[in-house]
Amino acid sequence: MTANPHRGEVALELPGASWVLRPSHTALMAVEERLGRPSLDLAMEARARRFGYREVITVIDCCLVRAGRAPDQDEIGRKVFEAGLGNEALLEALYEVWAMALRGPEKPGGNAEAPATAEGPTPSATAGASPVGS
């Protein structure tokens, strides 16, 4: 399975494992519930690379896109242990998961969106209106 950044997916490649993580509202709520800590605190710790083994396993387990046979927490834990908590691919994937949680997933064509309303009044809104103070 290949990660699709337009769907907010993050690739995680560890020795003997290739996973796709998709942070979502539901996944991040599950992380908060299981760890008993708010997402913002967890995101700041991930950014500072102060994540413990339990946090790493929980984030992967909750955000893992399961297609076909799904790894359980024990298998995830073994792969993380084999790779090491300092594995650069692991740290980068976790950082990206939390970066998406803070900024929202990228939209196709960039994150910028068009303004919701036109600038200034429309001609139909001003038609027949009297000037202020007259």
Image: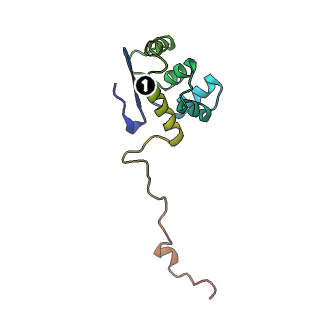
- Which residue is nearer to you in this view: 26 or 80? 80
Q: Is 102 above or below relative to 124? A: above
Amino acid marked by disc 1: Glu
Q: How is the image coloured?
A: rainbow
Q: Position of residue 14 (x, y in %)?
A: 39, 19
Q: Which quadrant of the figure contains the N terminus?
A: top left
Residue 54 seen from this side: yes
Q: Which quadrant of the figure contains the C terminus?
A: bottom right
Residue depicted at 36% across the width and 34% down the height = 4
* Crowd around label 1: few <14 · some 14–19 · many ≥20 (10 Å): few
Residue 23 seen from this side: no
Residue depicted at 52% across the width and 37% down the height = 101
Q: Is residue 26 left or right of residue 107?
A: right
Q: Position of residue 92 (x, y in %)?
A: 44, 29
Q: Position of residue 83 (x, y in %)?
A: 43, 16
Q: How many marks?
A: 1
Residue depicted at 49% across the width and 23% down the height = 60
* Residue occupying the far right of the picture: 36
- Which residue is nearer to you in this view: 79 or 126? 79
Q: Is 128 above or below relative to 32? A: below
Secondary structure, mark 1, is helix
Q: Would you name the residue on which mark 1 appears?
A: 88
Q: Position of residue 125 (x, y in %)?
A: 51, 74
* Residue occupying the far bottom of the picture: 134
